[in-house]
Amino acid sequence: MIKTKTLGERMKEARDDKKCSLQDISNVVEISKQALSRYEHNKISPKKPTIDSLARYFNVSVTWLMGYDVDKNFTVSNTKERMSQLTIKLENFSEEKRESILKHFEDTINLISKK
């Protein structure tokens, strides 16, 4: 994956596509308009939970929002493709490391499922 744009550029693009103001976003995701402006102008970087909230608001993939050259839309087929790519990458690790990665993945899924 190649990063082609900044998060701020992608935020602006998504905001233009959705035809919404910073205030509109602020009202829904409960992030100040000032902070959103700083993100959009690449003055500060949001934390992961904020990026997740913004991606949900814009209905785009987190990876796309972060500026990578990937499909903009979050879809099940996109997720399946990414999982397939990760599975191929896992083959390069030792059995011990693969098990550790898979355990971490399962733990993360279980943790998120409880919320």
Image: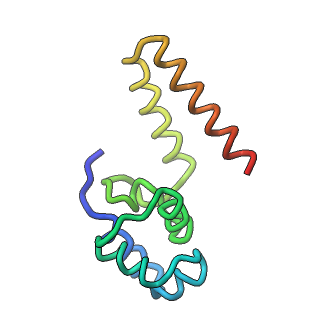
- Camera-nearest residue between 44 and 77: 44
Q: Residue at x 42, y 60 (%)?
A: 72
- Camera-nearest residue between 96 and 91: 96
Q: Quadrant of residue 65?
A: bottom left
Question: Viewed as shown, does residue 74 lie left or right of 63?
Answer: right
Question: Viewed as shown, does residue 60 lie left or right of 38?
Answer: right
Question: Viewed as shown, does residue 34 lie left or right of 75?
Answer: left
Residue 31 percent across, percent down from the top left:
53, 76
Residue 33 percent across, percent down from the top left:
46, 84
Q: Does 24 sit above or below residue 65?
A: below
Question: Viewed as shown, does residue 73 lie left or right of 56?
Answer: left
Q: Does 13 sit above or below residue 83?
A: below
Residue 32 percent across, percent down from the top left:
50, 81
Residue 41 percent across, percent down from the top left:
29, 76
Residue furthest right as drawn: 114
State the quadrant of the N terminus: top left
Q: Residue at x 37, y 58 (%)?
A: 66
Q: Residue at x 47, y 32 (%)?
A: 84
- Looking at the rendered structure, the number of numbered marks drawn on it comes to 0
Q: Residue at x 40, y 17 (%)?
A: 93
Residue furthest top as drawn: 95
Q: Does 8 sit above or below residue 2?
A: below
